[in-house]
Amino acid sequence: MPADPGREIHPFRSWDVIRAIHDQLALLERGPLHTGGFPKPSIRHWIVTPIGENAKAVSRPEGTDVEAYQVKPHAIQEICNKQQFGAGDRHYLGVQWTLWDGQLVITMLITVTVLHSTLRIEVTGHALGPVNPLFTSKPEAPSKEVAKSFKPWETRKVMLPLVTTNEVVRLAVRAPLTWYPPLLNWLGGTISLPEPFGLRHAWADQPWRHRFMADDALRAATPVLRVVHAAAMRVLEEHGADTEKFGARSAVLSGLVQDPAPKKADLYDA
């Protein structure tokens, strides 16, 4: 409702709110205290296309509104303003941090919808955990411990061959029967990774098993929420909307974030 009963709210669109949030998120790395704080985040506009379950293939975007597989700015603004209900692509504003030398990726996705007289701002957090140690640890040759000949109470380490005799024989027998590579590709023997994330989610562990990574993921949520809320309030006030009810909701949200109820510090119930 308007702040002044005698006037109407100045019209605004979702893109106006998204642009204000974008500008405020760019200042996250700046803080009033010299305590390190946030590193510089990556803030980008995401266009998400719905993909059916068990899809066999995913294609890159095409058309006049796409250049170098990326949606042009004017098309991003149009999707943000118009495609909020029903079929079609959706717009998200993503703020992302890559931490721990690439081991942890924190992504906050923000979407704004304006339907009738309802303004809805959703913020969702996603944490992609550390790489499985299988991919970061050094390979080690097989070995076994055997007792020493003259000191049976002591053991020594004996290195085993990398390839066993049975494996060598199996490879020698199978080698003449190997498919010709171009023929194998023609028959569908290649592996193509889906766009745009590949298989990282398949070989990443849960960040909640790492104490500091879990802390970083949880601590990033509150500042982003407050920045989004402040930017949205500023847009509403500039367009003559009454923000009193939103202020009460903000106080409730801050209370939930600072909930003093006892919890298990090392357990995340998602």
Image (cartoon, rainbow, N blue to C red):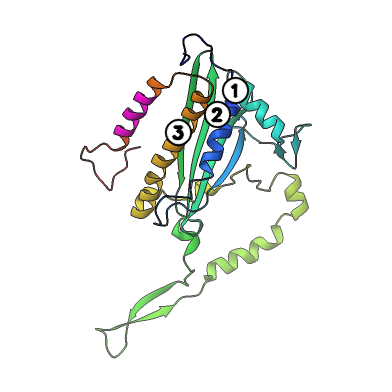
Q: Residue at x 63, y 21 (%)?
A: 82
Pinpoint residue 180: horizontal percent, then vertical percent: 75, 55
Residue ranking furthest to the left: 262
Residue identified by numbered label 2: 17
Under tag 2, what secondary structure? Answer: helix
Under tag 1, what secondary structure? Answer: loop
**Mark sitting earlier along the chain (3/2):** 2
Residue identified by numbered label 3: 230
Spatial separation of the CA atoms under disc 1 and disc 2: 7 Å
**Mark sitting earlier along the chain (3/1):** 1
Q: Residue at x 68, y 62 (%)?
A: 175
Question: Is there any visible trace of residue 149 in the rendered image?
Answer: yes
Q: Badges 3 and 2: C-beta atoms under 8 Å apart?
A: no
Q: Amino acid at mark 1?
A: Arg
The quadrant holding residue 168 is bottom right
Spatial separation of the CA atoms under disc 3 and disc 1: 17 Å
Q: Badge 3: how crowded within 10 Å, few (<14), some, or many (20+)?
A: some
Whether 253 is among the magenta residues is yes
34 above or below 93?
A: below
Residue identified by numbered label 1: 13
The quadrant holding residue 210 is bottom left
Magenta segment, which residues?
A: 247-255
Looking at this view, is 43 or 214 the one in front? Answer: 43
Dominant secondary structure (helix, strand or loop) of the stretch shown in magenta: helix
